[in-house]
């Protein structure tokens, strides 16, 4: 139960920080657009804001699920450096732009959803037999 609580805390912390940072940055950008209307073209509607909040929430959900994948490598090797290196490699693979930087693997919905589900599966497999195997 303690390990499950830790995983939930990590998942929620990742989700909330990504979602709130997206909202804060967007709010700052909207404020700049309000005071400097020549800088940003277009109008901000409530429909656009609600759509963005939902999209930011889904992106944060995917990222929080993907953030659980390095847990597998860390638990397997019982190593913090393995966890950190695997997290950096996953982020590099998902976030780096190919070609002229316009295509990212993380922008594809299928890849994001499948990696988030893989993260949830890794979390479940990590705590499934924790009382029997990983007690040391």
Image (tube, rainbow, N blue to C red):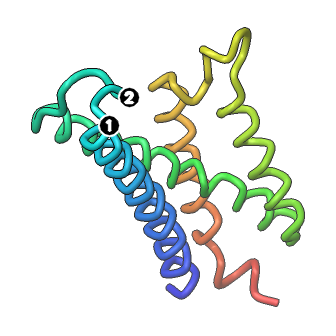
Above or below residue 65? Residue 43 is: above
Nearer the observer, 91 or 34: 34
Q: Residue at x 35, y 44 (%)?
A: 32
Q: Is residue 29 left or right of residue 93?
A: left
Labels 1 & 2 near each other (Cβ < 8 A): yes
Q: CA distance from mark 1 to mark 2?
A: 6 Å
Circle 1: is it few (<14), some (14-19), or many (20+) Cα within 10 Å? few
Which residue bears the numbered disc 1?
Answer: 36
Seen in the picture, residue 76 relative to 64 is either above or below; the reply is below
- Residue 19, quarter of picture: bottom left
Question: Residue at (82%, 63%) from the top-left corner?
Answer: 76
Left or right for 113, reference 55: right
**Looking at the image, residue 107 lies above or below residue 136:** above
Q: Secondary structure at mark 2?
A: loop
The residue indicated by pointer 2 is 39
Residue 81, image x, y percentages: 89, 65
Q: Position of residue 85 (x, y in %)?
A: 85, 54
């Amino acid at each position: 139960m303690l390990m499950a609580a830790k995983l939930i805390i990590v998942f929620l912390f990742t989700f909330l920080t990504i979602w709130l940072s997206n909202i804060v940055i967007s709010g700052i950008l909207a404020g700049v657009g309000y005071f400097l209307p020549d800088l940003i073209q277009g109008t901000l509607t409530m429909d656009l804001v609600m759509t963005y909040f939902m999209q930011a929430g889904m992106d944060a959900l995917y990222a929080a699920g993907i953030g659980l994948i390095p847990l597998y490598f860390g638990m397997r090797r019982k190593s913090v450096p393995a966890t950190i290196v695997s997290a950096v490699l996953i982020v590099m693979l998902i976030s780096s732009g190919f070609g002229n930087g316009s295509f990212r693997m993380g922008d594809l919905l299928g890849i994001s959803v499948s990696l988030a589900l893989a993260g949830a599966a890794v979390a479940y497999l990590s705590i499934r037999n924790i009382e029997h195997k990983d007690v040391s």
